[in-house]
Image (spheres, grey):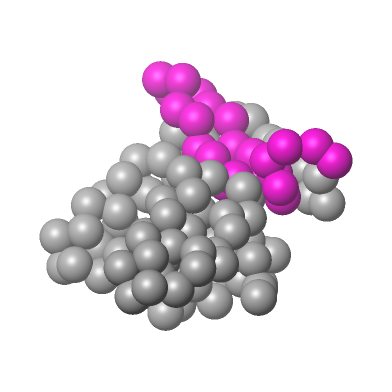
Amino acid sequence: MIETMVTATVHNIRSAIDGKSPEQKATWNAVCLADFGDNGAAFVAIPQIPPRNVSWFKKGKWVHLAKVGFEKYFIRKMKKGNTEPVYEKYVLKLMGVTRLHDN
C-alpha cells in the first residue's frame, strides 16, 4: 500500500513543479507477506480499506520461505536500479493490483 501512496505523491509533485494540478490517486491495494519466524501469513486486500473487492488470506510455513525469496529478489532489483520490472508490473496487474487509479 505504501508504494501506491508514494507513487501518487511523486507524480503529483512532478505535476506541481510543472505548474499542473495534481491528478494521481493511490489505489490503496495491499499485498503482504508477514514473517513470524518459521511461519507466516500472506494476504491481498484490494483496496486495503473496506469495502473490499478482493480479500485473500493464507498462513503457513510456505510464507516464511516466500518472504525470504522475496527479500532476495527485492534487494537484487534495488541494486540494479529497476524498481518496477515490466514482468512484475504485468503479473500484479493480472492479479488486479495496480499502483495508481486509471484517469
The picture quadrant where one finds residue 68 is top left
Asked if residue 7 can be seen in this view, the reply is: no
On whether residue 81 falls in the magenta region, the answer is no
Q: Residue at x 83, y 51 (%)?
A: 53
Horizontal placement of 61 versus 72: left or right? right
- Which stretch appears magenta? 30-51
Residue 7 image offset from top left, x and y in percent: 43, 59
Asked if residue 5 can be seen in this view, the reply is: yes
Q: Residue at x 50, y 54 (%)?
A: 4
The picture quadrant where one finds residue 71 is top left
* Residue 68 against residue 85 in the figure, above or below: above
Front residue of 19 and 69: 19
Horizontal placement of 12 versus 79: left or right? right
Residue 10 image offset from top left, x and y in percent: 37, 60
Residue 91 image offset from top left, x and y in percent: 56, 71
Residue 3 image offset from top left, x and y in percent: 44, 51
Q: Residue at x 66, y 73 (%)?
A: 102
Q: Residue furthest front?
A: 19
On whether residue 41 falls in the magenta region, the answer is yes
Front residue of 47 and 96: 47
Q: Residue at x 63, y 55 (%)?
A: 27
- Report the quarter where the C terminus lies: bottom right
| Total marks in image | 0
